[in-house]
Structures are given as structure tokens and as C-alpha cells.
Amino acid sequence: MNRKFLARASAATLVLAVTAACSSGTPTSSTGAAASPGSSGGGKGYKLAFVQGVTGDAFYITMQCGVQAEAKAEGATVTTQGPQKFDPTLQTPILQSVVASKPDAILIAPTDVSSMQQPIAEAKAQGIKVVLVDTTVKDPSVAASSISSDNVGGGKAAFDAIKKLSPKGGKVLVIGNQPGISTTDARDKGFADAAKADSAFSYLGVQYAQNDPAKAASIVSAALQKNPDIVGIFASNLFSAEGTATGVRQAGKQDKVKIIGFDAGPDQVKALEEGTVQALIAQQPAKIGTDGVQQAIKAIKGEPTTASIKTGFTMITKDSLSGAGQSAVYKAGC
Ligand code: T6T
């Protein structure tokens, strides 16, 4: 199988720490140590808070590592917390308690484009600077800056990868997360638009796994029973990709169905090594976190910020894992 075409260079640094995850439902804090030599230390003493989309997710753990490292370099302090599920009803009270602790700025990955708009507006109304990391809301002008991957482009890249692996075309399916999440909605759309525009492919639509690998696996099993000739599946986030690999493996179809997964958590990398998954689209969560802290500190100081920052991604294959791709793999702990 020609996997080399998929490989791309990556610039991130890998520290695959298999220590305890540094993310939890309760606040964790990084001490506001003195700014490291060479850094500006311009954020010294500032109080930052990071609200993840969900805890225990290697994507947000890696982002937390970037947030903490940059805050430390700037001499700022940061607390991190997030909901147990990607759910605005769980994230809202967490945000409200963070607001009550009066940080100078909040970095947040909103779990829903609509429901999180008002709670975020309320944080801003308290004079707290807001930076959106990863996901966004319907009106991102509430934030000083929004930082995310090119998610539509990532979805299209996933389709292009499936097309290279299955040039004759055929049926393709998307295993999504849940509607209302800006990132995964954009990835699903990027893939769907590209698939629909190619007459060799038949787009079967998107089914939602609600961040549950077991649900993704059962959706895939049922889909493969109904359409045994599916040639490719795009799994648009970490949990969907984990479950999709399980579903295809359980159906014994790993030689027939090409899987492209978004994200690069440890279980996803295992599936790539085993050959169940053909490529992973790794985001740059640590960079999103680093940029987020920099923008937050600028906002606190009243300096100009960048309204929208797009970060890149790396297509990792089994071949590139032993080289450049390895540095794009997410961390299990800082
Ligand atoms: O794919 C990431 C993130 O970008 C997305 O917004 C939600 O799912 C992940 O956290 C992976 O689980």
C-alpha cells in the first residue's frame, strides 16, 4: 500500500510522557514560577484559567501542556479544569465557578456553538479577557482571539487521502462527534463537500458517536452490515476514530475499509501501527495552547490581539511514525 504520499513534515517536539495525565475534572494549577531565561516574562503575576472541552482527552491534555509551559515562561499562573463529557450543561457551571475566581483571562474550548455563547459573554462582562481555543461560538467577537486548526481543510484532506487509497471510489461514511461542535462540524462538512463533488464516490452521510468509542464501534458494525462494500470511513475526532478502528476490526474488514482518523492519541497510534487505520490527521494542540496564552496576555495588557489564528496539521502514517510523524503524536501527560 502506498502510504508515503500521505506523509508530511511536522515541526512539533515529541515528549511522549506516559506519566499520569495532567488533566482532571478538578482544578489543577501550575505555579506561577519566575519567567524562564530568555522569555519576556511579560505576563508575570497574571492569573489565567483554562477550561477544556472535556477532561481525559489526549488532545486537551497536550493543549494543557502548551498552556502551562507558556504561562510558566511568562511568569503567569494557570488553573485547568473541564467537564467529564463534551456537554455545555456540564461546562457552563465550571465556567461560572472559574469566573467567580476572577482570573485576568480565560482560555476556553466551548462545547457548543450556541449554548456557550451567553456564559462566555457573561465572563467578558465581568472584565475577564476571553480566548477561544480549538472550538468556537456563533459570534466569536466575544473573544480577544480564536485559535483553531483549519478544520474544513482537514476534512477535505481526509477525503483526498481516502481517494488516494481507494482510487476507484465507492461508498464513504463519516463517524462524527455530535452536532453543534464547531470543529467536528467543520471537518464533517469539509469531507462531505469533497466526497459529494466526486462522482466516483457515494457519500453515506455522518453518524454521531457522542465522544464514545463504544458507540462509534457499534455504529460502524451496523453500517458495515448494511453496506458491506464501504471503502472508506472518516472518523472526525479522537474518540470516533478509536471506536471506528474497533468496529472495522471486529467486522474483519481491516483489509477492505480505509480509515482516516482526526487526532493522534495513544490508542489511535496503536491502531495505525497495527494497520487498522491508514492515516491520522494530527492537530497542533500544544501550539494552540501556547498561542492562546500569548493572546490572553496581550489582551490583558491592552495590546492588539489577532482575532483569528489558524494552526496546521500533520498527516501521520505508519511509515512516518518512525520519523517526522512521531513528533506530532499527542501526549498522555506533561
Ligand atoms: O478533535 C479534538 C478537538 O479538536 C475537538 O474539538 C473535539 O474532539 C477532540 O478533543 C478529540 O477528542
Image: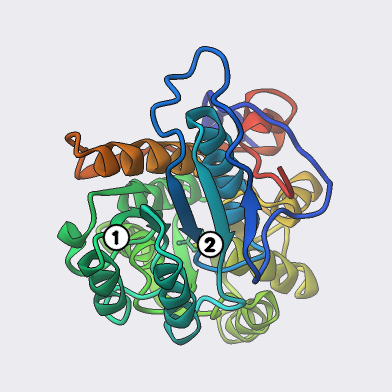
Q: Which label's residue is closer to the chain start, 2 or 1?
A: 1
Quadrant of the rendered structure where residue 251 is? bottom right
Helix, strand or loop at mark 1: loop
* Residue position marked by numbered label 1 in the rendering: 199
All told, the count of numbered labels is 2
- Name which quarter of the figure residue 201 lies in: bottom left
Which of pointers 2 and 1 indicates the residue nearer the eye? 2
- For the point 15% across and 58% down, which residue is it? 141
Provide the residue designation for mark 2.
237
Residue 221: name its quadrant.
Answer: bottom right
Quadrant in which the N terminus is drawn: top right
Q: Position of residue 256 (x, y in %)?
A: 66, 60
Q: Position of residue 17 (x, y in %)?
A: 79, 40
Q: Amino acid at mark 1?
A: Ser
Looking at this view, is 181 or 322 the one in front? 181
Q: Which residue corresponds to the image point at 58% horizontal and 49% vertical from the top-left?
A: 64
Say few, some or many: other residues with alpha carbon within 10 Å of mark 2 (under 14 / 14 to 19 / 20 or more). many
Give me the residue at 46% from left, 39% from top.
45
Q: Between residues 233 and 9, which one lies in front from this camera angle?
A: 9
Disc 2 C-beta below 8 A from ligand 1? yes
Q: Left or right: 218 with respect to 154? A: right
